Image (cartoon, rainbow, N blue to C red):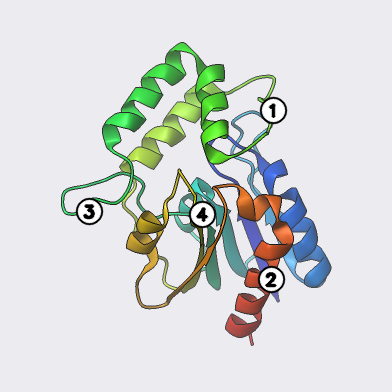
């Protein structure tokens, strides 16, 4: 039995994956489904992943990095506009300069609402700000995001990337995922395009899952 574990990106919540989760449940009605919520603006939720299920990680943006750090033997992993490293490093010019994330952390402490709203705009999201933001949690995960430099999980990986993504540009996606055991698919649109068009995202996921789990 397979299952899908979903996690959203930084400053978002599980509702951003609701349409994709519904399509997964429709296409794979016998599969288990678990949705994480990191608690940035809603109640946190960490589902218990059953040991008798072959779990496939599906993470959007930072949600992919979060999932692959969990102590799970993943059947496969799917990154939707995801990454294993976000900031530039010596010899690794792709990504965002760490100083810009540091500036974002400083602004987050002074004006969290404006910081998150501006981030939503850069992502291409029209999502409304939550009524309450958990600023310490946002800062903790943004710090982790800045410092990430993860190895890929020991499973096959599908990476979905968008040409006009200002958060995870294609050059960064290729730097993270152009390795053995990974398939990269590129689409038009911004950081949220594949969540706004979940059927497009779902078609890529279905083809991949039917190949990996055949």
Q: Which mark is residue 178?
A: none
Mark 2–mark 1 distance (CA, rounded to whole Å): 28 Å
Find the distance from the CA under tag 1 to the CA under tag 4.
21 Å
Query: Taking 155 as reference, is 58 left or right?
Result: right
Q: Look at the image and tell me whether residue 52 can be seen.
A: no
Q: Residue furthest bottom?
A: 214
**Earlier sequence position, callout 3 versus callout 4:** 4
**Helix, strand or loop for disc 4:** loop
Residue 209 locus on image (x, y percent): 63, 76
Q: Quadrant where the C terminus lies?
A: bottom right
Q: Is residue 113 or residue 34 the one in the foreground?
A: 113
How many numbered markers are drawn? 4
Q: Are marks 1 and 4 in contact (CB under 8 Å)?
A: no
Which image quadrant is residue 46 in?
top right
Q: Which mark is residue 92?
A: 3
Q: Is residue 58 left or right of residue 16?
A: left
Residue at left offset 48%, top offset 54%: 82
Residue 103: percent from left, percent from top: 34, 23
Find residue 128 and name its label.
1
Q: CA distance from mark 3 to mark 2?
A: 32 Å
Gap in angstroms between the C-alphas marked 3 and 4: 19 Å
Query: Secondary structure beneath disc 1?
Result: loop
Say which quadrant the N terminus sits in: bottom right
Q: Earlier in the sequence, mark 1 or mark 4?
A: 4
Q: Position of residue 66 (x, y in %)?
A: 49, 49
Residue marked by disc 2: 203
The answer to whether residue 175 of the structure is visible from this angle is yes
Mark 3 vs 4: CB contact within 8 A: no
Q: Which mark is residue 81?
A: 4
């Amino acid at each position: 039995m397979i299952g899908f574990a979903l996690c959203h990106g930084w400053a978002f919540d599980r509702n951003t994956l609701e349409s994709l989760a519904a399509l997964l449940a429709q296409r794979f009605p016998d599969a288990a489904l678990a949705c994480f919520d990191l608690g940035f603006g809603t109640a946190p939720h960490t589902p218990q992943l059953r040991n008798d299920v072959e779990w496939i990680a599906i993470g959007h943006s930072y949600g992919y990095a979060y999932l692959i750090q969990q102590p799970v033997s993943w059947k496969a992993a799917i990154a939707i506009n995801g990454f294993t490293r976000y900031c530039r490093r010596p010899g690794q010019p792709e990504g965002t300069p760490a100083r810009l994330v540091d500036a974002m952390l400083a602004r987050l402490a002074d004006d969290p609402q404006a910081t998150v709203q501006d981030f939503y705009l850069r992502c291409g999201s029209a999502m409304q700000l939550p009524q309450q933001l958990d600023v310490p949690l946002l800062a903790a995960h943004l710090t982790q995001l800045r410092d990430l430099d993860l190895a890929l999980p020991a499973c096959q990986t599908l990476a979905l990337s968008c040409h006009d993504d200002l958060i995870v540009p294609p050059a960064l996606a290729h730097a993270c995922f152009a390795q053995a055991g990974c398939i990269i698919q590129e689409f038009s649109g911004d950081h949220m395009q594949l969540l706004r068009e979940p059927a497009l995202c779902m078609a890529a996921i279905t083809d991949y899952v039917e190949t990996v789990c055949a």
